[in-house]
Amino acid sequence: MKPRLMPFEVAAGTLKPLVDLEQSLKNSGLEHNLIELVKTRASQINGCAYCIHMHTKDARAHGESEERLYLLDAWRESPLYSDRERAALAWTEALTLVAQTHAPDEDYALLSAHFTPEEQVKLTVLIGAINTWNRLAIGFRSIHPVGAHRAAA
């Protein structure tokens, strides 16, 4: 895979509001581990290797367990996630796949049971932001760091 272009090199000014939004979300009061789980789950759904790499690395650096990261794709079948995390993950899936799900009432009811109205807005903006980052990374073929592993030729 070859990158198409480097968005920050050609349009840093256009991306600055999105970077500022990230800082705002980081300081929003939502739990750091919840933010990283949401970002990782949306990135899994969208198939964004760049963002999956980034957010699992960030999650591990902030104490998230390998086991919970490995099982994130199957969170509904695992007891490792809290009710609040489950509500956030269900909302993440509903909004990431909004053209298919239309944000079902059941998912919103679950969200409302575990998040204040202000937190609901913050979480929804977070989900929108990671979906935007996924589209940038996938659309322009951003390549995650490969470290000690070599990329396929």
Image (cartoon, rainbow, N blue to C red):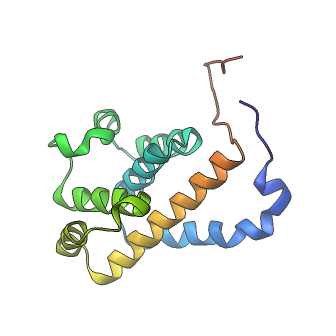
Q: Residue at x 34, y 43 (%)?
A: 64
Q: Is residue 27 visible?
A: no
Q: Quadrant of the N terminus?
A: top right
Judging depth in this view, the residue of 30 and 136 nearest the camera is 136
Measured as percent of width and height from the top left, residue 44 is found at 44, 43
Q: In the rendered image of this protein, does residue 81 appear above or below residue 120?
A: above
Measured as percent of width and height from the top left, residue 132 is found at 58, 61
Q: Residue at x 14, y 43 (%)?
A: 79
Q: Quadrant of the C terminus?
A: top right
Q: In the rendered image of this protein, does residue 60 appear above or below residue 122?
A: above
Q: What residue occupies the far front of the structure in this picture?
A: 100
Q: What residue occupies the far bottom of the structure in this picture?
A: 117
Judging depth in this view, the residue of 50 and 102 nearest the camera is 102
Q: Taking 64 as reference, is 23 left or right?
A: right
Q: What residue occupies the far right of the structure in this picture?
A: 10
Q: Taking 15 as reference, is 46 left or right?
A: left
